[in-house]
Amino acid sequence: MKRTTLMVWLPLLVSACAVSRVDPLTVPLSYTQNPKNAGLSGALGCNALSQVQVSDARSDKTLGVRVHESQPLKADVTAASDPGVWVQQGMQSVLAQNGVIFQNKGPQLLVSIDALHTTESIWHRSSYQATIAITGRLESPSGKACWQETSRGQAENYGYSGSNEDYQETLNSALDTATLNLAQLQGFRDGLCKCSD
């Protein structure tokens, strides 16, 4: 009798655990420094920047999309805060961890957000992906452009569906990677010296 009852209820319990709807989501962008990023870019010959200034060059400001793995369910993800501020805070943090000093003298780093996209794939829980593309340009104090190049970062994560914490961890990891990739470019490293006056 008990076995028959279990066989009847088991499919119902399993289906109850699976997500049956996908709602739009708004995610607050919040940067948290990762101690593991310290020193990863290597020693810098010149290490001064006056500031990091970020603009959002994306035409589509949607942050990403939520999709169901087995049903045709889909919803948009938007950012609850300014992506430019988030990128600025994250880049300054990672660059400082890798020896860059922010002071009144030195070149400024102008950054444009070219792409920023998340994908949350939902079943019982969710897998998360984030990609970001940024273009950095170094300008001397007099406004002379010394260097420009694009850098990208990607990250993956897994956790509960619609989790702000999992979104933030994935996005922050992608931003860290893009920033470190930029800091390791020889043109950026040379530009820190060439753009000093």
Image: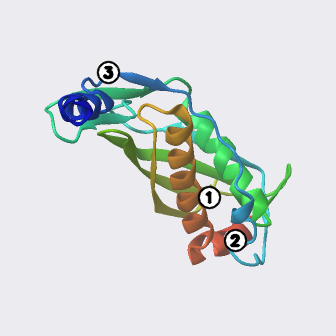
189 to the left or right of 163? right
SS for tag 3?
loop
Label 2 Cα crowd, 10 Å radius (few <14 / some 14-19 / many 20+): some
Task: Choose the circle earlier in sequence order: 1 or 3.
Answer: 3
Alpha carbons under labels 2 and 3: distance apart: 50 Å
Q: Quick check: 54 above or below 43?
A: above
User: 41 or 136, which lies in front?
Assistant: 41
109 to the left or right of 171? right
65 to the left or right of 85? left
At x 23% / y 28%, what residue is drawn?
9
Q: Quick check: 175 above or below 180?
A: above
Alpha carbons under labels 2 and 1: distance apart: 9 Å
Alpha carbons under labels 1 and 3: distance apart: 41 Å
Q: Nearer the viewer, mark 2 or mark 3?
A: 3
Q: Quadrant of the C terminus?
A: bottom right
Could you tell me if residue 172 is visible in this image?
yes
Residue 138, percent across and down? 62, 58
Q: Quick check: 109 above or below 56?
A: below
User: 58 or 161, which lies in front?
Assistant: 161
At x 24% / y 25%, what residue is drawn?
20
Circle 1 residue: 138
Circle 3 residue: 23
Mark 1 near mark 3, Cβ–Cβ under 8 Å?
no
Q: Residue 32, located in which quarter of the rendered image?
A: top right
Q: Residue 18, located in which quarter of the rendered image?
A: top left
Residue 85, percent across and down? 62, 34
Task: Choose the circle earlier in sequence order: 2 or 1.
Answer: 1
Label 3 Cα crowd, 10 Å radius (few <14 / some 14-19 / many 20+): few
User: 8 or 184, which lies in front?
Assistant: 8
Circle 2 residue: 194
